[in-house]
Amino acid sequence: MSRRYVSRREFLKISGAASTGLALTAIPEELLALLERPGEPLARGVLTDIGGKPYGSPVEILGGDKYFQYQILDKKRTRRVLIKTVQVTEGYPFPEVVTSPRIGIRLDSPNLMKHVAPSGAGSVRIYGYIEDVGVRGSVVENALSAAEAQGLSPLLVFAPTWPREDNYIRDKVFGVIDYHPTTVFNIGNEPDNKYVQFWQGQDLVSFAHFAMTTLGAIWERSWSQGGSTLAVISAVQDIKNQRRYLETLRDAGMNFGNPFLKFGLHTYQSVNDLVYKIPIVRNAFSRVGVKKPALWVTEGGVTYPGWSKWITLEMAIEAFRQRIERFYVHTLIDGDEGFELMSNDGSVHLPTYYGFQSLARRL
């Protein structure tokens, strides 16, 4: 079946540029390249309303850009629409995959790891207890290997399930560095969380000891030998504990000036939550003598039923505007938490999924 694609002159007329006297160069070259694309469309989809409900006839997607828009063919008319208003039903709506190390996504499933990079994420956060590290066939080991095979940088949540001897922790650190050298350590996870206990008798002091033991092992195996292994100190569950948390880490001897050390932040549901938390965290760091902490959002997203997942993308954009180094979506699939950007089997990707691919092209 033949298809007609509009010329540049026609596009200017449709877009209103011709009547306003805008020069042809006012349209980004990336968009111009889509106007006369030969052959088949890259993908197909349907337009959706503000609640994500499909309406109207199917549309053909000629390509996406870094402006959060698609060029579509709708009833023989070529036009631009927002990515957030299209549910892709077939194909991949970009000419190639672009990833950014500043974008990450939480995913524990080795079998779904191939879906991470097409979203624009260059890193994947893998949640695993240290007891499974180095255990052949464990989900953690398989996930790390799958991430590496896809060219992703793994961020491993490194947390014990009960008290462990320091030598045990050191051996696990050595195993990660030796066999998965590109892995970033996410040391612990919400040590003040009273609802999810990560080890018996947990408190900030015991966590600080665990963190210092882990960092000491990283120094021994990596930093002292010229290595550049990165480590992220866990975010707190309650932002009100941030100052006490940092003071406890300082009293344990932590060097906040370590260039390989990053610090986590968790934020959910809205841009306002992120904007509220960032100054609190930075002020807490200022109280312990750190003026410019290296912050990573290691969990961010929207879980409430009926809330647009596009908010997650808006949170990431604001995070980068606020000089956050990395933003990790929590999570790629639903599981039992509701932060998903795609269905559990990977057959359906929400518009936000492709929104992050668009963002990766801007970073």
Image (spheres, grey):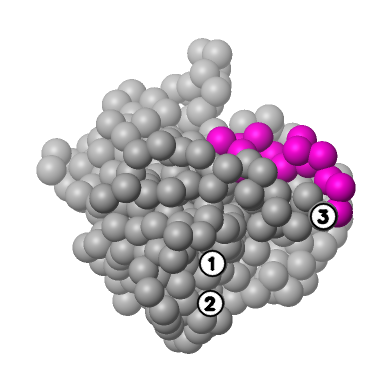
- Residue at x-position 63% and y-position 41%: 8
Q: What's the magenta bit mostly, secondary-structure-wise?
A: helix
Circle 2 — which element? Answer: loop
**Which residues are the magenta region?**
20-33
Left or right of 194, for residue 291: right
Which amino acid type is marked by label 1?
Lys
Q: Earlier in the sequence, mark 2 or mark 3?
A: 3
Q: Which one is nearer the viewer's eye here, 12 or 44?
A: 12
Residue 208 position, x and y percent, is 57, 52
Tell me whether the residue at label 1 lies in contact with that at label 2, contact meaning CB atoms closer than 8 angstroms.
yes
Check if residue 207 falls in the magenta segment.
no
Q: Is residue 10 above or below residue 213?
A: below
- Does residue 162 appear to the left or right of 74 in the view shown? left
Q: CA distance from mark 1 to mark 3?
A: 28 Å
Question: In the image, residue 26 lies at what x, y percent?
Answer: 78, 41
The reply to whether callout 2 and callout 3 are in contact (CB within 8 Å) is no
Q: Which residue is mark 1?
A: 84
> What mark, if any, has residue 308 been given in the picture?
2
Q: Secondary structure at mark 3?
A: helix
Residue at 65% in and 74% down: 270
In this rendering, position of residue 336 left or right of residue 351: left
Is residue 359 visible in the rendered image? The answer is yes
Q: Measured from the top left, where is residue 145 in percent x and y? A: 26, 35
Label 3 environment density (alpha carbons within 10 Å; few <14, some 14–19, many ≥20): few
Picture quadrant where residue 198 is located: bottom left
Discs 1/2, front = 1
**Residue closer to the observer: 203 or 12:** 12
